[in-house]
Image (cartoon, rainbow, N blue to C red):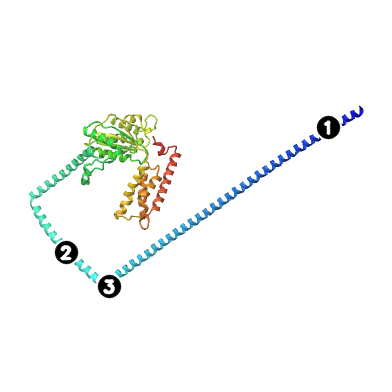
Amino acid sequence: MQEQTLQLEQQAKLKEYEAAVEQLKSEQIRVQAEERRKTLSEETRQHQARAQYQDKLARQRYEDQLKQQQLLNEENLRKQEESVQKQEALRRATVEREMELRHKNEMLRVEAEARARAKAERENADITREQIRLKAAEHRQTILESIRTAGTLFGEGFRAFVTDWDKVTATVAGLTLLALGVYSAKNATSVAGRYVEARLGKPSLVRETSRITALEALRHPVQVGRRGPSLEARVRDLAIATRNTRKNRSLYRNVLMYGPPGTGKTLFAKKLALHSGMDYAIMTGGDVAPMGRDGVTAVHKVFDWASTSRRGLLLFVDEADAFLRKRATEKISEDLRAALNAFLHRTGQHSSKFMLVLASNQPEQFDWAINDRIDEIVSFDLPRREERERLVRMYFDKHVLKPATEGKQRLKLAQFDYGKKCSEIAELTEGMSGREISQLAVAWQAMAYASEDGVLTEAMMDARVQDAIQQHRQKMQWLKAEGSQPPVSAWTK
């Protein structure tokens, strides 16, 4: 039994040993697995670090290449600018040299002509002096004979006149009546002139009118009755209504035109008057304030003068917001307030004698009484793509193509596609007004006149277009700096 007990103990120890061996093997397997996991993690980290480093090196190489390319481009641009400057300096030096040689040749020619003239005068000095002496003697003899003859006739006539008292009395009476007639005619003419000027003369506030006064009719007799072309399609309805109103002698409607500067508001008013068969008169709101106390009288004089038109008068007030401001909130002088009250008094009711057309860039500044007198509102937006192309073509034909084809002026056109160029310019001039496009065409003409050969090239047109675009952007920045909105957004419905 002891032997069996020992065997059992030995077997138990053996099993414990085997279990310890198995546990040791499991621990070794776990340690090996942990080591493999750490090894794989380290390899992964090293791979990621290597990939990041390679990517960093690639980006660095790309940035270095970009910097080198930029430096190369800057160097090429600098070399091109230096080349252009050298060519410009060489051209200027050539022009200056040509001018200098031309001046020297001109001076040599003038000097040679002066020397030849002086030599000829020296050679002919004796003959010239003899001719002068003979002419002087003949002239002196003629004058003496004339004096003797005139003295004789005057003496005999005066002696006969003095001896006849009837002639003396008649002469004195005639001179007296003549003096009285001249004095009376002078005063009558002055009074009649003041009356005619008050009834028919142009008031001081009116800057331009189609009405022909008596003085203008005497100055320009051929231009009386001339009228412009018909109205464009966008104002046809309003023009037809105004024309029918004039024919039926009804009451005219007042119109407000608002929009950015240079969109054709003044031209609209002129064509509306001409198409309707009316006279037109243009005044500016900024002219009223400087007149002070005379502003009320000037306003009444304008409306009195407008009421004398037989054809009906279209009174166009440009920049009306400078004059017709709000009386409650705006700080205006008493004189301007009185002039505004006079204007409101004369426009309180519709008239069959005149039609009121107001133009403004800021209609929100109008007095409410002015808004109450408006019957029709016409919005003038900036020209769209098709309208800009039409304007570019029209002004290009007027200021460039027509003078170049007529050959009367120092202007020539290089060979390029004019229609395609006008379309490209219309695409580039987005946001510009009709006045800016007109100024662009005038600038093309001026560039051609300023060139040496008088030829307008495509590159010159492109350069001027870029300058105009830059100037337009600068104006928009000024508007934003002042807290105002640019016309593109301010007048878009």
Viewer-proximal residue among 345 and 293: 345
Residue identifier under label 2: 142
Viewer-proximal residue among 116 and 31: 31
Q: Nearer the viewer, mark 2 or mark 1?
A: 1
Query: Disc 2 or 3, which lies upstream in sequence?
Result: 3
Give the left or right position of residue 13, taking residue 187 as reference. right
Q: Which of marks 2 and 3 is in front?
A: 3
User: What's the CA distance linking mark 2 and mark 3?
Assistant: 31 Å
Image spot of residue 486 (x, y percent): 42, 39
Question: Is label 2 in a helix, a strand or a loop?
Answer: helix
Q: Which amino acid does label 2 sit on?
A: Thr
Say which quarter of the image contains residue 3: top right
- Say which mark, if any, is on residue 320: none
Q: Which residue lies furthest to the top in this view?
A: 1
Image spot of residue 231 (x, y percent): 28, 40
Viewer-proximal residue among 54 and 393: 54
Residue identifier under label 3: 123
Query: Disc 1 or 3, which lies upstream in sequence?
Result: 1
Q: What residue type is labelled 1?
A: Lys
Crowd band around label 1 with a 10 angstrom C-alpha radius: few (<14), some (14–19), many (20+): few
User: What's the CA distance linking mark 2 and mark 1?
Assistant: 173 Å
Image spot of residue 233 (x, y percent): 29, 39
Q: Do the residues labelled 2 and 3 touch (CB within 8 Å)?
A: no
